[in-house]
Image: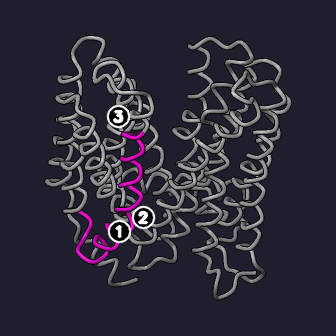
Amino acid sequence: MTNRFLSPFVVLCTVGFFARMSYAMARTPLLPLFALSLGASPKAIGFVVGASTITGIFFKLPAGALSDIYGRYRMLFFSILIFAFTPFVYYLVTHYWQLVGIRFFHGLATSVYGPVAMAMIADTAGDQKGTKLSLFSSVTIIGNLIGAPFGGYILNYLSGNGSNSLQHFHIAYLVCGIMGLISFGFTIKLMVPGRADTVHTKNSPGEVRRKFFKGIREVISDYRIIITSNMEGVQNLSVGALEAFLPVYAVTVAGLTAFQAGILWGAQVVTTILAKPAMGKISDRYGRKPIIFLGMWICAIPFACIPFTQNFYLLLFFASVFGVGEAFVTSSSAAMVAEFCKEQHYGAAMGTFGSIFDIGHASGPILAGLLLAHMSYQYSFLIIAIILIFVSFVFLLTIREGNGNILKQEV
């Protein structure tokens, strides 16, 4: 049972930290190495790794909408069940193609959890939506940041710098499961007796369907929600492109080591984590729109500059500034989306936001790869930067923040 030292928000952040740590461990680097050990080709490994992203694109919106009908805690509980127990299913894998189905199902956990948790925060944050959503996001990013290298360390420790056996992967996935079970334990704390859920429904299946589609229709027909969500989607397109090709550029063009390439990406992630809570507070006080617009430019300029230098310290500077720009955009966009929609449709709004987010992230490496197949890094990165600047003006000219400010005053 929660007490004054463990508020629902703190418990929800703890749930997110361990859930995302477990998920990150299961994905990187365990998953591709596990598939490789089972004889998967590079093409098959890419399909295995990408399976969970496909889940997010298609299921985040309906998952959020269902939480508007059946309640946040029920849907959260369902997602954490998947986080907690799916790692043990990897024990049953004997052929790499089985990983596709498991990853698709495992991805359902983040597809449900992401929009539902954000809607839970929006339900209770009042005029602190930017602050709390940003803080929550930073905590889950830290979980991701710790989970991946921790999984690699476990494999390295078990192998003794030799090759990994099937048993080594089983042990690593056991640790993933333990992290998931810890998250599950904290979820139980949230479900205390007497806590009001968002909606209790005893409606007929027909009435549930009506509410489900009504919520989705009202959200996706609001151009403000779609355009604001697209800000993070397009910004995340540049994140996906940078994630895929900054290490390649650093090693093959700039002549840096793989370790230095890792530092460049780590610097971007760390600056985002550090800047997000502060930017969330600023957006709560001074408004979302100027923060998002400025953030798109802070991302676009260093992104375009990266392929024009091979100096490690300049690349480190550009990657860090890009991380600050990411914090500007992501600290405000989700909060602004929440303010534009009706409170009973927060779940559908966060689901729409999450689906666009995943589409952007998945499209980034694909677009960058297509551009690089026909032109240099300089022109490829410049084109993506121009896309960021173009959509920032679309946002500036089409979105008015007045409704959001009125809503904040009424909450």
Rendered position, 69 above or below 107: below
Classify residue 103 by image quadrant. Answer: top right
**Element under disc 3:** helix
Q: Are marks 2 and 1 in contact (CB under 8 Å)?
A: yes
Q: In the image, residue 399 lies at what x, y percent?
A: 21, 58
Give how far across and how far down residue 213 sits, in percent. 54, 51
Tell me the residue at 58%/59% (across/down). 116
Outermost residue, bottom side: 4
Q: Which residues are magenta?
A: 263-289
The three-letter code of the residue at mark 2 reads: Ser
- Let me know if residue 78 appears in the view: yes
Earlier-in-chain disc, 2 versus 3: 2
Give the left or right position of residue 205, taking residue 247 as reference.
Answer: right
Which dot marks residue 134?
Answer: 2
According to the picture, the residue beneath numbered tag 3 turns out to be 242
Work out whether mark 2 precedes mark 1 in sequence or the reverse, and give the earlier one: 2
Residue type at the position of mark 1: Gly
Q: Nearer the viewer, residue 137 or 400?
A: 137
Query: Would you name the residue on which mark 1 appears?
Result: 280
